[in-house]
Structure formats: C-alpha cells, structure tokens
Image (cartoon, rainbow, N blue to C red):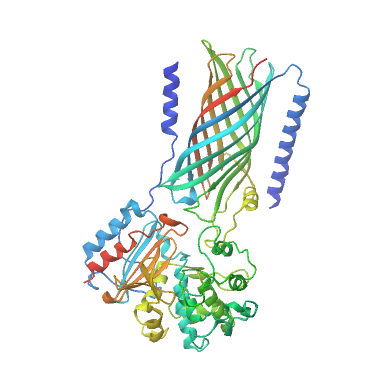
Amino acid sequence: MKRTALFLLSILLFTSCLKEDELKKPYVSFIPRQINDGWEISTPVEENIDTDALKQIYREFHADPEIWQVRSLLVFRNGKLVAESYTKDDNDISTPRAIWSCTKQVVGLLTGIAIEKQMIHSVNDSISAYLTETSRHPDKKNILIEDLLAMRSGISYSNDGLAGQTDDILRQLPDNITDFILGRQLQDSPGVNAQYKDCDPQLVSAIIQSLCGKTTAEWAKEELFDKLEIKNVRWDNYKDGITLGGFGILTTPRELAKFGQCVLDSGEWKKETIVSKEWIKQMTTVQIPDLYDYQFCYLWWRDKNRGMTFMWGHGGQYVCIIPSKNLVVVMTAEVNTQDDFQFIEGAFTWVDRIVKIAN
Amino acid sequence: MDEIMKIKFKRMKAYIISLLFFLLLLNCSGQGNDIYRNSFFSPGFAQVKEGANFGLVFNGPALNYGMNWDLKNDKRIIIFGYELGVGVLFSKSIPALGIHLKPAEFAYMFRFPGTNSRLFIGPSLKFEYNYYLYPQLQSGFDYWFTDFSCGVNARYDFKYKSSAFRINANSSIMGFISRQPDYRDPYFFDIGFKHAVRHLHQDMTFAFLDKYNTAKLEILWKPGLKSRLTLGYVFAYSGYYQNPDINMVSHSIKIVINEKQK
C-alpha cells in the first residue's frame, strides 16, 4: 500500500513540472531579406567582412544562454545591410518595439534640424525664449538649450525606481508634463553638473513642439522619418499632447539603423542632406567625459576607447557607429528588463568582434 | 460586454446566489450536524509559466495559509474555506512575487450511493485570485489570473491500521475568468493597489474547461483518529490556454491543525 502510494506520488511529482521554452531560436542564416524598406542589401564578401567568422558570431549570439534577452543583431557596412538575424521572432523585422532612450538621440537629430531651419536660434538660447511655462517657474529661466542637450539643467529629477519622476510620467500622473518638470526644484545651477535624466530631452521635445505648430512626432515624420524612409515607427505623446522626449519611440532594428547610418554619413541619407554636417559634428562632440563609463555628447553617447558613437536604450537597444570601419551595428533586446537583467554587460564585445573581422 | 455575455453573467450570478442560499438553508436546518474546523499551512514549491515571459518558468518557495469548516452528517458534507498565500519565485535569478487569494470556497458533497460508501461528491464554488509582479523583467506591469469557478469536489475517506486517510480532489468546470490583456503599451502603465483591485476583475469572461482549468489533489494522513495534526501532500494546477496563456503548478506539504475535539 505504502509503496503504491509512494510510486503514484513520484509519478505525479515528475510528470507535473513546467519546462522552460527555448528562449532563442537556433541560428539559421544571417542573409538579409529584401523587404524594400530603403536598405540596399549586400554580402559580407562584397563588403570585406570575414563570412565564416561572422557566421560564428551569429551562431554564438543565438546560442549563448547568458544573453537570453537579445532579439536582434544587424550589421551594416558601407551603407548596406550585410547581415541580420532575429533570435526570437522573425516578425521583428517589421514589428516596432520600444527603443526607450534611443529616443533621446532622435531628439538630438531633430534639434539640429530645428536650428538649421532657424526655429531655434542657438543652443545658447535660454529655454524661457521658447517655453511660456517658465513664467510660472522663473528659477528655470537660466537653463539654456545646451544644458538640456548635455543633461546639465540642474533640475532635481530621477529616472529610477518607484520614487523617480519618470515613474510618475509613465503612469501619466501629472496633467502637464512641461509644468511638472519645470516645477521640480533646481538641485544645481544650470550648466554646472551633469546628471543623466529623462526630463532634459523632454523639455527639448516641448521646445520643438512649441515652434513647429504640430506635435514633435508629426514634425519628425516630415523632417526626419520620411526623408530617412522610416515607415515602421510610432512615437507616443504624453496625455497633454506633448511628444515624449526621453523615450517614446517604437520602431524596428532596420529603421533604427537609418539614424545611425545618417550620423555615420555626416547627416546624409542616400546623398541627400537630412541634418547638417556641422550639427552632426557638434552633436557628437563630448560634453561629459565620464557618464556610466562612457562619454556623453548632445544626447548622443561616445565610447572613446572604441572610437564609437552610439545610441543606447533601456533593456539593451544599441545602434553602434564605427566610422573607422564605415560600420553600423544594431542590437536589440527585451525592453522592460531592469538593472543587471538588461542586455548591457558584455554587449559591446559583440561589436568588438564584428569590428575585428571587418577588414 | 455583449448581450450573450450579459446573459451568461446573469445566469452565473443566479447559480452562485442559489448555491449560496442553498448552503445557507442547509446550514440553518442542519440538525445533527457535526462541525469540524481546521487551519492549515502549506509550504511548498510553486512554478509559473506566464505567456508574456518569453517561455521562462519561475520556480520557488510558496506558503499558503487557510481555514476550513466542515459541516457533516451521514448524508452530506458542506465545506467552507478560505486560503491566502505568497510565493517568491525565480527564473535566471530574476525575482517574481506571487500572491494567491481564495477568499471563499464552498462545496456541497453528498454521499455517493451505497449506505457504507466512503465517497462524497458534489458541486463546488470558489473565488480565486492569482497576482504576479515581475519587477525586474516586466517593470511597471502586473499579471493576474482570476477565476470564479463552479466545479466538482470529491472526497474519499478510509482507514488503514490506526491511521485515517483522506483524498480530496477538485476541478473547475466553468466560470468567470479575468486575465491581463495580450498587448499592453510598452511605455505607459498603471500599477498600484487600486489598479490591482480593478485589474483582477477586468473583462471577466465566461469560460469552460476548454479555456481554463484549476484543479487540486490532496492526500491527507491523520496518524490517529483523535490526532490534532494531519499531514498531507497537495498538488495544485491552474491553466489558461489562450493568449496570454499561463500555467501554474504547485507541490506542497499540508500541515493541518484540527480543532480540539470535545
């Protein structure tokens, strides 16, 4: 009796456990699909990349259990798409996903266009020249647009945790996002100390929106997305109608790469100037020498050691631009992971390996 | 809510009210009933596979506490109980918090035909909430599976030497369920106590076994007939089979403290 009961119990125990799914698909191929999205497709051989070594990198990218969060790896060289693979879902090729803070870098590009069009006179202008809300918050009148681009507004604001203000914005608690940010205390004098935060690019988006007569997102479509042949994109507004600036864009890895290629080509896309060369240079000039082990420019990131400019979004969304190799590498990952569970540690080693085999 | 759902909801409400009223009547007229009360702890191992979690399975310890009242006579047993539990689960070191609430569970079981039959069987009704947070994986979003289920409950008692054994089994058949939506805005979210209460009852839909099932098997052992302690093994399963699907499994040891017998 006892034995039978134990036997039945053991069977129940062993047969009633849940099994984890395969978190990434096995590697099949990195040959890009032609979907007529504006990218010219090429091969590693034509673009002087070691095919076997690239294949090995992709194989490991798919197989490495440590980087279970990754979703895509794309390689562009000489303005052409050379390799792409999606580790979880092939539909990622055309399914827009959140790119979080890579939105900041798009705001950086739009600022250049706004200056070029003389909507913004200069980065040295006070924000009070553009944001009427500053009349209610006179202590913010000394903040310059440059301070916002270099995260030096001095506004007391935190991106992190439940007590952080980004959490309030994501829950859409404040009625007016610009008032909410400008209503925060100044913890430093503007232009003095840098602190990475979502509120500064948010104010840049509010400034652009105050000038263009439509939402920043709509203006971006006309002035940037359409010109870069970016169609698979969505950019969210806050509930008061102001386009989000610190995050808020959803797009695909292929579309994301177009921003990178445009910066690599000094503001051009297929020989047409989208953003001025001067702005690209100014935008990618280091402003903060040390921020999370990298350098920060006007809303763009630099890795001096790698000679790399990059876009960086929460969870592990990257567009890496390596001018010395005429190379753009895009990596995306699951979007809502936090802290150490994001695809951060070791992410650039994949880029290093690709750089190494690009002759 | 469309018309069919409204009708189903009304019908289900009528069933629930009738069953509760019936149980109340039985209780009031229950002359010769014995009432047994017990409380229990169930430390165990729980697993959750949530469709939104990319195929990850969260495993870890869980602890449940609850109380049961049995009103029993020769012909039938009425059970009322509640249960609450918490689990801290992990997958690839990513933590998750699980909360399990069963504010009320009722069953009315009649003796299976045969005067000496030791099998009782009958309908059951339960209200059950499963609520999960994955702060490091799905930051900002909450996950839930709620079921208000009608089902069947069976109990078989037998003695072996000086020990008493009991096998309890329960399975849902139909009910109202609530599940988080398949797609959520990747940026904006609402989460907080009042949202959790609202979410747990959001978009309740009527469903049968083909869409979900919750089931439980208990094997209990009482070392002596008058022992105040009963030990047992409990296997519980809940599953929702449409997007976003979820499967929850738990194996636990049940430690029951019976009311002191007069």
Give coordinates of residue B236: x percent, y percent. 52, 34
Q: Quadrant of the C terminus of chain B?
A: top right
Image position of A219 (left or right of A49): right
Give coordinates of residue A44: x percent, y percent. 25, 69
Count of numbered circles in the view: 0
Q: Residue A315 sits in which quadrant?
A: bottom left
Residue at the far top in the pictured view: B161
Q: Is residue A84 above or below residue B71?
A: below
Give coordinates of residue A95: x percent, y percent. 46, 64
In depth, the one of A243 and A26 nearer the eye is A243
In depth, the one of A266 and B119 nearer the eye is A266
- Which residue occupies 48% across, 75% down? A152
Image position of A97 (left or right of A140): left
**Observer able to see residue B6:** yes
Q: Is residue A138 above or below residue A75?
A: below
- Which residue occupies 38% across, 48% down? A22
In depth, the one of B55 and B113 nearer the eye is B55
Q: Residue B30 sits in which quadrant?
A: top right
- Which residue occupies 41% across, 32% down? A14
**Observer able to see residue A267:** no
Give coordinates of residue B250: x percent, y percent. 49, 35
